[in-house]
Image (cartoon, rainbow, N blue to C red):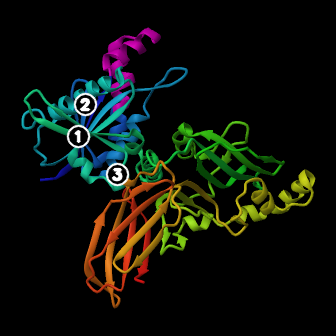
């Protein structure tokens, strides 16, 4: 007995149409095309995994079993790269469904189970109808759908790149499954997926949070002194509610870039860094991202006890609550090695200003100096000033100056009473702020339980932006 956990159903999307297209362009018999250009390459892509998989053939599709999760991603990676060998190769489109089951070695998917029917009809066929209904046209490229059970197996980062789909089948049964991003299902190690998922999380968080209309990109790239290629030292991105003047400097060995783009281009820009593995924008050399090599992380940074912004936002001189996307990197050894050459270039460009001054004056990044490791940061600041909090007698009052696009209903307060350094029974959680001109105002009469102070937590939507200890006067 052997427990084959993961089931992968693979079918060529538009199998007959693909074969006919190849046949018409090559004058080869369509049956030969189906075997030599489609079935055989697909079989080779799967059997290379050896004993890690068990393979069952059908007329024009395959059912694969494995008890190794990485093998699932490996198979999808290999299959999705199969191409029709034209002069300009064209990827073969596949439809893939992945599920989980506890099966024995005598399992026969045709006689003993509804596995094939479920994966093909209830998931793949429905998803194609769903896609056409949503988009207005049929899906033409490789796609992957997964069962709810397989979704539960995935890491949190991978789950972030799945979208729930619900439908009722012909028997009146409610079916729930997920469409999965192909790039996620192709990533065996999960390293790229971490970054892609964090970008997606950041984009979802900011989608409805601010009045941002533009974003600015500030970057320093330099030429490696040993091999001459361009390397990215840092990329600093900030979301803006208005446009601003661009200010770039180009020399032979150093370029500081300042560009401004429409906010609608942010998603494509961020994902291009991961997909291309390089900093690449029009008008400037392509620069490697090899120095920015740590895992990307998302943070929401707010005030700490009403006097400073929490880390890592404070490292970039952020002064208001903000969504932060951050990817760290290596120490600036290569930059230091190239500094002599860069200084010479800058002397010719504009007197004797060192690299630090160029960054601070042309990019207005006053925090940066040569001690900073390579980094990529995206800052989405919220216009919420430090709140004024008072606790006088029985009255707690809060005044919060903020942008008018931040609504009273989005602010929640949590009050915990304190006496002699311990919590009391007093706990208040509500969102009764009211807008008064430029401020959101909250006032509450506290029926005393002997509190001499309180802890006040403030939340914007689900994001905590203040944790403040306030003493009763």
Helix, strand or loop at disc 2? helix
From this viewpoint, which residue is outermost toward the bottom? 420
For residue 111, above or below residue 367: above
Instruction: Report x, y in % for residue 36.
Output: 37, 22
Q: Residue at x 9, y 34 (%)?
A: 173
Helix, strand or loop at disc 3? helix
Q: Which residue is mark 2?
A: 124
Q: Residue at x 42, y 72 (%)?
A: 467
Q: In screen coordinates, is 69 left or right of 90?
A: left
Residue placed most toward the observer, 176 or 244: 244
Q: Quadrant of residue 42?
A: top left
Query: Is 21 colored magenta in this rendering?
Result: yes
Q: How many neighbours does mark 3 have within 10 angstroms: few (below 14), some (14-19), or many (20 or more)? A: some
Q: Residue at x 47, y 49 (%)?
A: 199
Instruction: Look at the image and give the residue range highlighted in magenta.
Output: 14-42
Q: Which residue is mark 3?
A: 70
Task: Look at the numbered discs 3 and 1 and tell me whether their residues touch, using CB distance below 8 Å.
Answer: no
Q: Which residue is mark 1?
A: 177
Query: Which quadrant of the figure contains the C terminus?
Result: bottom left
For residue 437, above or below residue 318: above
Q: How many neighbours does mark 1 have within 10 angstroms: few (below 14), some (14-19), or many (20 or more)? A: many
Instruction: Report x, y in % for residue 425.
Output: 23, 80
Mark in front: 1 vs 2: 1
């Amino acid at each position: 007995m052997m427990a084959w956990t993961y089931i992968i159903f693979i079918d060529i999307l538009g199998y007959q149409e693909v074969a006919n297209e190849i046949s018409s362009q090559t004058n080869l018999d369509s049956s030969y095309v189906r075997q030599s250009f489609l079935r055989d390459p697909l079989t080779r892509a799967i059997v290379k995994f050896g004993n890690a998989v068990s393979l069952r053939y059908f007329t024009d599709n395959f059912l694969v079993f494995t008890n190794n999760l990485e093998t699932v991603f490996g198979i999808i990676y290999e299959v999705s790269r199969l191409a029709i060998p034209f002069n300009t190769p064209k990827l073969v489109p596949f439809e893939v469904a992945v599920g989980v089951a506890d099966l024995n070695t005598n399992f026969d998917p045709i006689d003993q189970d509804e596995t094939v029917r479920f994966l093909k009809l209830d998931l793949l066929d429905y998803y194609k109808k769903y896609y056409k209904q949503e988009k207005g046209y049929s899906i033409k490229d490789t796609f992957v759908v997964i069962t709810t059970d397989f979704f539960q197996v995935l890491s949190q980062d991978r789950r972030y790149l799945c979208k729930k789909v619900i439908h009722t089948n012909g028997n009146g049964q409610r079916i729930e499954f997920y469409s999965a991003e192909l790039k996620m299902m192709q990533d065996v190690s999960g390293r790229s997926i971490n970054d892609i998922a964090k970008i997606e999380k950041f984009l979802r968080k900011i989608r409805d949070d601010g009045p941002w209309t533009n974003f600015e990109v500030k970057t320093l790239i330099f030429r490696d002194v040993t091999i001459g290629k361009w390397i990215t030292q840092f990329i600093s991105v900030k979301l803006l509610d208005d446009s601003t003047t661009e200010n770039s400097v180009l020399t032979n060995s150093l370029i500081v870039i300042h560009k401004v783009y429409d906010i609608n281009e942010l998603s494509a820009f961020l994902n291009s860094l991961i997909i291309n593995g390089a900093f690449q924008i029009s008008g400037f050399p392509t620069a490697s991202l090899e120095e920015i090599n740590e895992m990307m992380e998302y943070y929401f940074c707010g005030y700490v006890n009403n006097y400073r912004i929490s880390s890592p936002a404070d490292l970039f001189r952020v002064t208001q609550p903000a969504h932060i996307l951050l990817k760290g990197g290596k120490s600036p050894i290569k930059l230091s090695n190239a500094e002599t050459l860069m200084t010479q270039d800058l002397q010719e460009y504009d007197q004797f200003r060192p690299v630090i001054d160029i960054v601070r004056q042309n990019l207005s990044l006053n925090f940066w100096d040569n001690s900073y490791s390579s980094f990529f940061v995206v800052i989405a600041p919220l216009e919420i000033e430090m709140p004024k909090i008072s606790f006088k007698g029985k009255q707690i009052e809060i005044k919060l100056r903020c942008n008018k696009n931040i609504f009273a209903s989005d602010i929640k307060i949590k009050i915990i009473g304190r006496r002699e350094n311990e919590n009391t029974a007093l706990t208040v959680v509500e969102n009764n702020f009211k807008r008064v001109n430029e401020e959101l105002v909250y006032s509450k009469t506290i029926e005393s339980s002997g509190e001499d102070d309180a802890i006040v937590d403030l939340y914007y939507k689900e994001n905590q932006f203040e944790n403040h200890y306030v003493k009763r006067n």
